[in-house]
Image (tube, grey):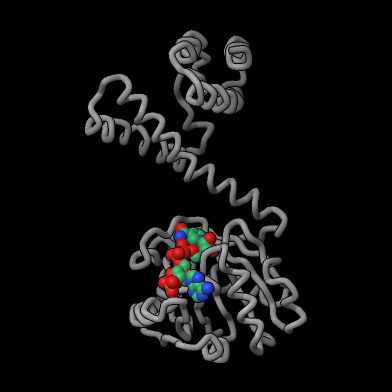
């Protein structure tokens, strides 16, 4: 397999580095800005291409590591050339391989391969990828080849149905981006309580990190603590009395989710009062 990257950004840099570090053949990079492909090629000790045609010719697998909104456009440029027998891959979480419409007419095969991790730095991203779980979907032709490739690298990888990709990506947003929103809400509430910004910024961190570690080590059910888990309806009622607007609604809806976890954890505990308060407040 010889892999070429179209799009020298965070994932292109990181995936290329990750592959070359493990002796997987990477032809090189083509990108919109030649400076980006030059830099990526130097970083991975591969070649930089000035013409799209040339990287297509010299690669049997093309990773389109461009933003989601550009995949269709880049694909429409690629299919101007002979791509018979080649695999085309994009790394979007929300899009499926169906974005490569009509690819079988060109005798090529389309895939989406998504690392379930945040790659925020192109120079250190290969370390994030080495710990990432991946999903894949696409044509049967090379599916097992890609599964073997990533399993060989030590990355757990599962096949996902193309029609589930949007929901799957939504799940990743719940576990990462939405937590950022919750954290920001908590910081704002501490500042509203009169605590300094510097103190607030640091104060919640041990709680937040400890919680994340507990979820990782023990799973959500065992990790759950707090007033909902204790069926402490009085405290939850007091919280609801001081919260307003969106904060109150977020608290109420998420607490209803926590009751479900708490009932699993403590099947003999009575959560009826709490459920009543959360549903009717
Ligand atoms: N970053 C993450 O955490 C992450 C995680 C999982 C999956 N992904 C997926 O990975 C893909 C790439 O994301 P990214 O974060 O690496 O984006 P990025 O850092 O913005 O990089 C995308 C690169 O694509 C190049 N590009 C844009 N339009 C192009 C075109 N028409 N032709 C050729 N090159 C073009 C740009 O290069 P120039 O510098 O040449 O303009 C840019 O550097 C997306 O599908 C994204 O959903 C990202």
Q: On the rendered structure, is 85 left or right of 177?
A: right
**Rendered residue at 41%/60% (across/down):** 128
Q: Is residue 252 above or below residue 138?
A: above
Between residue 72 and residue 227, name the one nearer to us.
Answer: 72
Establish if 94 lies above or below 55. above
User: Residue 103: x, y in percent?
Assistant: 72, 77
Residue 207: x percent and y percent? 35, 32
Q: Is residue 209 visible?
A: yes
Please tell me which residue is depicted at 27% across the width and 30% down the height of the picture.
200
Please state the horizontal and vertical placement of residue 275, each as a whole percent of the image: 61, 15
Quadrant hosting residue 105: bottom right
- What is the number of callouts on the image? 0
**Residue at image point 22% right, 33% down:** 198
Q: Is the residue 125 above or below the residue 31 in the image?
A: above
Quadrant where the image shows the N terminus: bottom right
Q: Quadrant of the C terminus?
A: top right
- Specify whether 162 is left or right of 120: right
Q: Residue at x 50, y 31 (%)?
A: 222
**Residue 229 seen in render:** no
**Rendered location of residue 247, percent (x, y):** 48, 25
């Amino acid at each position: 397999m010889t892999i070429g990257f179209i799009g020298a950004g965070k994932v292109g840099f990181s995936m290329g580095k990750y592959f070359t570090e493990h002796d997987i053949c990477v032809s090189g990079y083509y990108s919109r800005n030649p400076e980006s492909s030059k830099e990526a090629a130097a970083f991975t000790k591969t070649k930089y291409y000035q013409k799209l045609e040339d990287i297509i010719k010299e690669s049997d697998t093309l990773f389109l590591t461009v933003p989601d909104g550009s995949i269709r456009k880049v694909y429409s440029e690629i299919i101007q050339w002979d791509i018979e027998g080649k695999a085309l891959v994009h790394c979007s979480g929300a899009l499926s391989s169906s974005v490569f419409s009509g690819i079988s007419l060109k005798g090529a095969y389309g895939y989406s391969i998504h690392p379930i991790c945040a790659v925020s730095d192109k120079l250190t991203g290969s370390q994030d990828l080495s710990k990432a779980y991946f999903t894949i979907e696409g044509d049967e032709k090379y599916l097992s080849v890609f599964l073997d490739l990533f399993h060989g690298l030590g990355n757990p990888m599962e096949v996902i149905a193309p029609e589930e990709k949007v929901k799957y990506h939504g799940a990743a947003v719940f576990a990462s981006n939405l937590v950022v929103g919750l954290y920001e809400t908590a910081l704002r509430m501490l500042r509203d309580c009169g605590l300094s910004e510097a103190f607030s910024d640091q104060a919640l961190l041990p709680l937040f990190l400890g919680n994340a570690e507990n979820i990782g080590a023990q799973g959500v059910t065992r990790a759950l603590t707090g007033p909902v888990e204790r069926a402490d309806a009085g405290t939850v009622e007091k919280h609801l009395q001081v919260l307003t607007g969106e904060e109150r609604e977020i608290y109420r809806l998420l607490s209803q989710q926590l009751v479900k976890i708490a009932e699993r954890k403590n099947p003999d505990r009575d959560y009826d009062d709490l459920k009543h308060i959360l549903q009717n407040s």
